[in-house]
Structure formats: C-alpha cells, structure tokens
Image (cartoon, coloured by chain):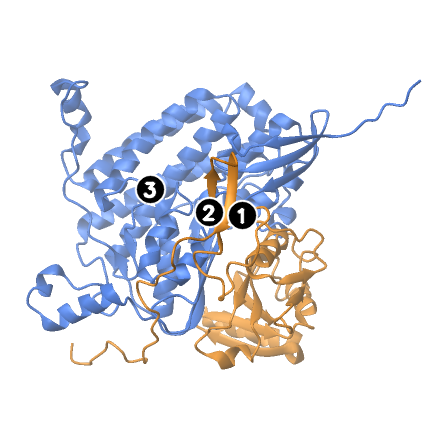
Amino acid sequence: MAETEIRNYTLNFGPQHPAAHGVLRMVLELDGEVVERADPHIGLLHRGTEKLAETRTWVQSVPYMDRLDYVSMMCNEHAYCLAVEKLLGVEVPIRAQYIRVMMDEVTRILNHLMGIGSHAFDIGAMTMILYCFREREDLMDVYEAVSGARLHSAYYRPGGVYRDLPDTMAKYQPGRFKNEKTVAKMNEARQGSLLDFLEDFTERFPKYCDDYETLLTENRIWKQRTVGIGVVSPERALALGFTGPMLRGSGIAWDLRKKQPYEVYDRVEFDIPVGKNGDCYDRYLVRMAEMRQSNEIIRQCIAWLRENPGPVITDDLTVAPPRHAKLKTGMEELIHHFKLFSEGIHVPPGEVYAAIEHPKGEFGVYAVSDGANKPYRVKLRAPGFPHLAAMDELARGHMLADVTALMGTLDLVFGDIDR
Amino acid sequence: MSAKLERMKQLLQIVAGDRLRSLVEDRGEVTVEVAAADYFEVARILRDHAGLKFEQLIDLTGLDYSTHADAARAQGKRFATVLHLLSVTHNWRVRLRTFAEDDAFPVLDSVCELWPAANWYEREAFDLLGIVYSGHDDLRRILTDYGFEGHPLRKDFPVSGFVEMRYDPEAGRVVYQPVTIEPRENTPRIVREASYGNAGHG
C-alpha cells in the first residue's frame, strides 16, 4: 500500500471574516476540524495612538482615547483623565464624579449589549443583535445629548466633564416616513431632561434583559454552543492576565469598582456577579447580570444628580478653561484661556498608572511626564490584548466552529487591542 | 491605604533589599528599580513570596529615556522595561523597572516563564522599541506591518515614519515609497518652571 502523507490544514480566519469583530487575521492549524494551533495576527488597525499622544498636548489626546475601544468610548477617556488628574493632583467636583460614574455604567450597558448581541449573532442567534441594537439606540441618544456625538464623545476632561447634563432632549421630526402620530409616540420619553429620559430607560431595561434571557439563557442551541467551551481555571485566568468578566467568569470576585474604588463607586450599591465554571456560558451570564447591576447604579446616580446641582469641572484655571461669561470681562481668565488652548496643561514630572474597571476588564493608562505640556510616554493597557493572547490556549482541541464562540466570549474590539 | 503601602514597602525591603536599586513611593504608587542582572530573580520573588504574591502581570512596556528632561534619572541608559504587577490576594500594585545595559542592543530576560501574559507584551515592546527579551521563544513583530523596518516608539523615529504605501496602477499592486509629507509640529514641546501659571493673586 502506498504511503499517504497526512498533514495539517492551515486556514486563514480573517482579516475580512464577519465574525472576526473587526480586523483580525488568525492562522489556524487544523487537524480535520480540530484546532491544533491558533496564531492571531493583530495590528491591522494599529494607528500608533501612543506615538501620537507623545506629540500632542495632554488634552488633545482625549479624543484619541475614544477611538481605542470604540464601543465603550467614555470609559477609555475616563482612565486617561484619571491618569492626568493623578499627575496634576487636581480635585474633581463631586457632581462630575457622579456624572462620570453614571456615564461609565451607560457605557458598560452599551458595550455588553454589543458584546452579547454580536456573540449570539456569530453563533447563529440572529434576533439577539437586532434587539440589542434597539436598546443601544436609546443609549446612543444619551451620549449625543451630553456630548453632541453618538460615538466619539470627548466628554470627559482632565478636571471633570466638559459641561453639565442638558435639560432637553433632541426630538424626532415628522417627515416622509414618519407621520405626526408615530413621532409623538417616539417623543414621549423625550419631553423632559436627559435624566428623565435615562430614568425612563432604566425602568424599561430590566424587562428587556428578561427578554434577552428568554431568548438565550435556556436556549438549547445557545447552551450547546457555549457550555464547556473555552474553560479557564481561576489560576490560569490570573496567570494569563485576564481581568473583568473574563476573570469573574472563572469565579474570582475581582472588580476594581469595589476593590480599588475610584470616583464615587464606594457610595453606590451594587453586587459583583461571579461565574463558576469559567466557560463561555458563565461569562455570558456574568455580563448579563452586570447589565442589571449597571442599571441599578445608573438609577442611584440619577437620584443623586437630581438633588445636587454644582460645578462639573475644576475651577483651577491652569487645568480647565474659565467659564465663558468671565472670559468676556476678566483679563486673568483671558490669559489662562489663551495659554490653555495654545500651549496646554503643564503637568508636573512623574509617572502614574491609573486603571478603571472598563466593561471588558482593566483598562489602564501608564503616563510618564517630564514636566512638559505633552506626555513623555503614554502606555495604554487594553483589556482585550491579554485576552486575545490567550486565544491559542483557549482554542486548542476545540472544533473550528467553536473559534467563533471564543471570539464572541473574549468580547474583542480591535481599536484597543491594536491601538 | 498608606499603612498597607508601608507594610508592602517593608516587605519588599526585607525580601529583596540588597537587590533593589531604589524604592520610591510617589502619588500612592510604589516603584522598584533593579539591575538587569537581578530582574528575573526579583520578578520571581515578587510572584512567589507568600507575603507579596503578585500573581498577575497587568502590563509590561518599554520606555526610551533618550530625550527625557531629567536625564540623570536614567543613569545614562536609554531603554527600560516597566512592569505593572497586581496582587489579587493582597489588593496592591507595584511597578518594577529595569534598564537594559547596552543602548545599541538592549537585552533583558524574558518573564514569560513567570507570567504567560508577558508573551505578547514582550513582543510588543520588541516591536515598538527594539528591546530583545532573551528566553522568549516567539519574539516576532506584533503590531506593525509585515516587513516593517525600525522601531516606532523610539524617540528618534519620526511620527510620520519613513515609508508610505499607495496603489501603483502601472505595477498593478500596492507599493511602498519614501514619505512625501513634511513633518510639522503645531504646538512646541515646552517645559516650564513649577510655579508657572500660578500668579498667586487669581
């Protein structure tokens, strides 16, 4: 009998695969349908954010942070602003801290809706993503109301947030496709302030979560595709640098919002959901429970923000611009304004690492200053980076179709992995 | 929190005292500096010592100190690797910095063996700064293009790079050519005195 040569089949997954969540090229070595080795090639979305930050003033880099993880924009800005504030040693007004916490949780829901929706979509549950995007639309409107932009908000600034929450919401207008009656119904929740609109959303949202759970949690196909896939032990999760839901899914109750509280997270009540088995299904449950917790945090923040008006950005004129009314009459304010926007903030020498509990895990900013108006070095610690690095270990021994399930559970976004 | 930091600093002194070049606390963060020769051993102690237990490598990155305003702090060396470690057990963090001895060919030990998470981080530092990690078994470029030359995060690398890419209709493919844009600096880099901007009467 003639000798037959058996060799592994090498498959290119991406860079234009719909389940690759952006631009990932993964070289898979297959033995039949079983993955022997996965080698992700990243960097197709590398824009050199860290290098660019070195040539921009401290404030000019804030919009770049939006473009890192482009489904949780404000959280990226938050970590960056915390780092600059830590270097400067400025106090953030308490109202700004509540606004930040509230917007962070809005962002967390946005991110998890996208994560779970596309995860389900990748492995066959088409309906999920449509429902998730319906709710994302409302939250995008919240983004637009506070900052003027639906995605790249640039709302947080070192020292606080750019402006206070608006008193009105944008309303739909009747036109060729929507008549008066439809528009009136769509505008029902938009009659009051932003807080009214968001409160209305938080009342509706638990019901939506129930709907998602009806669709997925006990769904036989969903469970067949996720239970027991990509199991990570707690020890291994720590060694691989996992954070966020990836770590909590393995049963480690680690959440920076509780363990190393920043802003006003020590004043709001919430629980940390923890998984048990460390598989894709548990991580899905963790994310689902986190959305419900975020909803509760938003409600607490709304209640506080209604009661307590106040400044939303520091009054230190070397850090934040002066109020516009004063600009017209005060010489000092005018000088500060000019220097701030031409030269930027001067940050004292030193180095800090500021981390927040980003929806995907720990997002950290390591900022080094040598006293100039620009950073000397900014290192962005993206949560997705170590998660994707573990892809090889997770995928080994699984079937080819499970790779998409793993991609979904890692909640990858290439903006922050490639930077 | 500060009592906790004190305890950690004392422990660090006891455990690795003679190996530490410096131990600084600044803005509530502890930074430890070690010589390149002691780097791996100190990292191992930080991970394994029951009282410290830094079981998680949160971040590893490189730094190029060649244009830093405070030149003395790098002791004349150019490249450093900085690790951010986290202990989930004790809930504390530490920063570990090591300077590579040779500026022309910076080499440091790889810590992949201690924390598997270091694998891609070291590849990234190699890619962007050209620091070589000995003992790393897969030190390929990671973020830059296939066939990229140079290390972009080095301070002597221009922001606009050296080559640009375009589609050449004659050749029928994408070609590389020297950059045609001129580098510009809109806001100059300025270091002011510490009291700048605080007139004291505002």
Q: Are marks 1 and 2 in contact (CB under 8 Å)?
A: yes
Instruction: Please report, as a chain letter, where disc 3 is located.
Output: A
* Residue at the image position 48 percent from the left and 26 percent from the top: A120
Question: In which chain is the residue bearing label 2?
Answer: A
- Which residue is found at the position 57% from the left and 69% from the top? B79
Badge 3 amino acid: Val
Q: Are marks 3 and 2 on the same chain?
A: yes
Q: Is residue B27 visible?
A: no
Pointer 3 local density, CA inside 10 Å: few below 14, some 14–19, many at least 20 = many
Chain B colour in the picture: orange
Task: Residue B103: name its quadrant.
Answer: bottom right
**Which element carries disc 1, helix, strand or loop?**
helix
- Disc 2 marks which residue? A416
Q: Which residue is mark 3?
A: A106
> For the residues marked 3 and 1, what is the alpha-carbon distance in whole angstroms?
23 Å
> How far across and down, in percent of the image, does residue A275 sit?
54, 39
Q: Amino acid at mark 1?
A: Phe
Give left or right: position of A129 versus B139.
left
In the rendered image, the vertical position of residue A328 relative to residue A248, given as above or below: below
Q: Which numbered disc flags the more N-terminal residue, 3 or 2?
A: 3
Q: Quadrant of the N terminus of chain A?
A: top right
Residue B162 visible? The answer is: yes
Question: What's the amino acid at mark 2?
Answer: Asp
Give SS at disc 3: helix
Dot 1 falls on which chain? A
Residue located 63% across and 37% down the image: A231
Label 1 sits on residue: A385
